[in-house]
């Protein structure tokens, strides 16, 4: 059976789709997927064993100049490519008008969330099979339920598995253990204060624990150097592509992350991670996997979903270090055993 999957963005959403592919592969070992995904995230689907072709799309870039996209033939070439293969089913796992638009013209039936389940209800008008999935659940579980109903198998009871191989992504040059700081994010309100990153780096350095800091743009590079300034155990990495950052995550003893797609990648690779949430809450889109600790700010603006208002005034480096230390004492395979007790201890302090 061959299925075309449409899940274009964002990085976290793409990663959250992987366990559904694992479920489908285990239910039907002969199933194969082709995946339509934003060009910037095209590396991720290639890492999953159930994916054959990855078909990049550039909606984010194209919509900045629709006329040029039409004239230069990129849209026509994309449409030709996705219609070259015959499919048994098309699944739109995004539930947005932009993703539903890509399902037009297929002979195969199209499955997606129904009007009460989709993020944009009008998207359901493009689907032949409209599937009801309850809101209020984690995104991973909603996608797993969509796939199980669309493909006709019973949903496994256990936690979803990403089926990414950490040992294949980790680079061989990584010798000493290290903690990775995943400090880059999009919303201003999601940024943990630079002074707190610096304080955490100082505390880890004092304990002779190495820290590595990646970056993706000029402002992130400046912040990385400010965090590392004068600390011998803290290394600012060169600019890396997504595969390069994934290799650094895969080789890390643990990560500390703000609400960012790279934090979800750490979870997908079974790397223990302390994720920091300010304007957002982790219940529906938090890091999903083994060895994941969620710390939530409790300031007046916390959890409001505002992109600008600062809300991390109550979450300090000492609290993050409390959560991080047990994860540093064990590998990813057994980290989950202490997550509950760690979160309970922090809850007793009023951190969670």
Image (tube, rainbow, N blue to C red):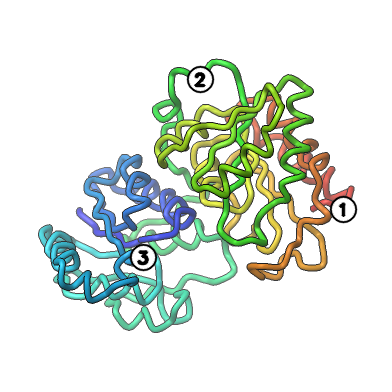
Q: Earlier in the sequence, mark 1 or mark 2?
A: 2
Who is closer to the viewer here, 61 or 133? 61
Q: Is residue 177 above or below residue 337?
A: above
Q: Measured along the vertical axis of the image, is residue 11 above or below residue 65?
A: above
Which-is-in-front pick, marks 1 and 2? 2
Residues at discs 1 and 2 in contact (Cβ within 8 Å): no
Q: Is residue 148 above or below residue 316?
A: below
| Mark 3 to mark 2 CA distance (whole Å) | 35 Å
Q: Closer to us: mark 3 or mark 1?
A: 3
* Location of residue 172 by image quarter: top left
Element type at mark 2:
loop
**Label 3 or label 1, whichever comes before in sequence order:** 3
Q: Position of residue 323 (x, y in %)?
A: 76, 38
Q: Position of residue 273 (x, y in %)?
A: 63, 39
Q: What residue sits 35% from the left and 71% below the top?
A: 112
Q: Which numbered dot is residue 174?
A: 2
Q: Residues within 10 Å of mark 1 (few under 14, many from 20)?
A: few
Q: Residue at x 32, y 66 (%)?
A: 59
In this orientation, does residue 291 appear? no
């Amino acid at each position: 059976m061959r299925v075309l999957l449409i899940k274009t963005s964002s990085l976290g959403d793409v990663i959250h789709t992987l366990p559904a592919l694992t479920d489908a592969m285990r239910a039907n070992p002969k199933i194969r997927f082709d995946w339509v995904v934003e060009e910037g995230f095209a590396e991720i689907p290639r890492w999953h064993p159930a994916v054959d072709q990855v078909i990049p799309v550039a909606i984010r870039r194209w919509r900045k100049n629709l006329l040029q996209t039409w004239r230069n033939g990129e849209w026509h070439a994309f449409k030709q490519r996705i219609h070259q293969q015959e499919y048994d089913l098309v699944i739109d796992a995004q539930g947005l008008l932009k993703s539903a638009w890509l399902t037009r013209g297929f002979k195969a039936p199209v499955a997606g969330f129904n009007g009460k389940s989709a993020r944009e209800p009008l998207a359901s008008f493009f689907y032949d099979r409209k599937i009801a999935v309850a809101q209020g659940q984690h995104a991973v579980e909603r996608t797993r339920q969509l796939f199980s109903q669309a493909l006709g198998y019973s949903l496994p009871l256990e936690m979803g598995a990403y089926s990414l191989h950490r040992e294949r992504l980790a680079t061989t040059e990584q010798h000493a253990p290290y903690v990775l700081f995943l400090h880059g994010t999009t919303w201003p309100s999601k940024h943990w204060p630079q002074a707190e990153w610096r304080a955490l780096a100082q505390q880890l350095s004092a304990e002779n624990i190495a820290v590595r800091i990646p970056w993706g743009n000029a402002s992130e590079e400046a912040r990385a150097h400010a965090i590392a300034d004068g600390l011998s155990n803290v290394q600012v990495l060169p600019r890396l592509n997504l595969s390069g950052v994934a290799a650094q995550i895969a080789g890390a003893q643990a990560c500390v992350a703000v609400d960012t797609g790279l934090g979800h990648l750490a979870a997908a690779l079974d790397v223990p991670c302390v994720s920091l949430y300010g304007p957002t809450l982790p219940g529906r889109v938090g890091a999903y996997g083994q060895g994941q600790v969620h710390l939530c700010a409790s300031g007046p603006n916390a959890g409001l979903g505002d992109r600008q208002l600062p809300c991390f005034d109550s979450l300090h480096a000492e609290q993050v270090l409390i959560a991080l230390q047990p994860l540093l004492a064990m590998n990813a395979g057994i980290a989950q055993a202490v997550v509950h007790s760690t979160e309970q201890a922090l809850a007793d302090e009023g951190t969670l």
